[in-house]
Amino acid sequence: MISGRLLSLSPYKTETTPARIKLSSNELSIEFPEEVKKRIAQEVSKIPFNRYPDPSASLLKEAIAQRLGIDEKNILLGNGSDELIYYLSIAVGEFDRGIFYPVPTFSMYGISAQVIGRERVEVSLEEDFDIDLPNSLRAIEERSPALAYFAYPNNPTGNCFSEHKIRKIREKGLFIVIDEAYYNYSGKTFIEEALQREDTVVLRTLSKIGMAGLRVGFMVAKEEIIRELNKIRLPFNITYPSQVIARLMLTEFYDLIEEEIKKVIRERERLYREMSSMEGIRVYPSSANFILFKSLSMPASLLHKKLVEKGVLIRDFSYLVPQCLRVSIGKKEENDAFLEALYKCMI
Ligand SMILES: *Cc1c(COP(=O)(O)O)cnc(C)c1O
């Protein structure tokens, strides 16, 4: 028999509608040059895939550690940071204590809690999408959750929460997870605290910087915490091809990625300016590689549909944030096509 816990659960939602221009999943829109692909093909062809891969993916871990300037002992790899969210929800605190997160936010925090059967302590963000501290502290006082998730910057709102509010919540004795999936677009991090404290870890991923298909995420934490979480990690959770390709990208071709990240940040500012001057929408500032905006003159679902008809796919988030949609920042041409399509929908 399937557990009752799952009956009320809905699976992770994603956009699968085919479209000419896909700005719906916060991926990095990058076409790697032929020489890169050839080099990858060469390395991939050497993989003895009849064998299990290195269970600790040590070469990939080394490449990540070097990029961050930290020790490999402070890193745990996951099949995407999604897997690490599951591990944290299983490993931190007892199951009779809940999991806190401000909403709206990334859906995996709630899904992992529900799957395991832990209470979800959700507190709505303020009007400006920052943490509502009084209500959060009250909920924590009343329901004593053991673990808190903060997407930093938050998805889908795009802002970074006030650091002092996160720390105030931690002071209540919660173990905090700072999910920095969009770190490369915000430049803000809790890594120093994660390396020093027993109650703070940071999650990162390669998904938003050009490698979503490889499924590589990682956690940065004190060695003691990594050692404990490693006990529940599924063996061989990073596939052989992913270990090889991700390592190659981080060591030999990272310049290409960095250049693209810079372009996305510039494009984000341009898109924000252009969208701010449009009638019929309200735009929210972003520290990530996407922009959230509100449709003022028609239902968000209708605007979404009209954009799809013009070949542009974005994400309708009105089920989570009233009237809001989220557009990922793509290449200049893609953003131009989006702006033009949006403009046409408005007139
Ligand atoms: C995209 C995203 C992730 C998922 O990353 P994967 O490494 O692809 O599993 C995690 N957290 C947030 C906030 C995200 O937006």
Image (cartoon, rainbow, N blue to C red):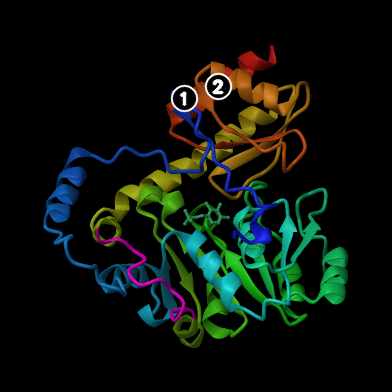
Can residue 100 be found in the magenta stretch? Answer: no
Most common secondary structure along the magenta stretch: loop
Q: Residue at the location (65% across, 80% down)?
A: 93
Q: Is mark 1 within 8 Å of ligand 1?
A: no
Residue at 66% from the left image edge and 39% from the top image edge: 292
Instruction: Give the Cα separation between the discs numbered 2 and 1.
Output: 7 Å
Which quadrant holds the N terminus?
bottom right
Is 27 above or below relative to 226? Answer: above
Q: Position of residue 274 (x, y in %)?
A: 62, 28
The earlier-in-sequence mark between 2 and 1 is: 1
Query: Is residue 17 left or right of 315 when viewed as pictured?
Result: left
In this rendered view, identify the residue nearer to me: 63 or 192: 63
Q: Which mark is residue 19?
A: 1
Q: Point out the stretch of residues depicted in magenta.
A: 229-240
Write down the residue under mark 2: 308
Determine the image quadrant of residue 122: bottom right
Q: Secondary structure at mark 2?
A: helix
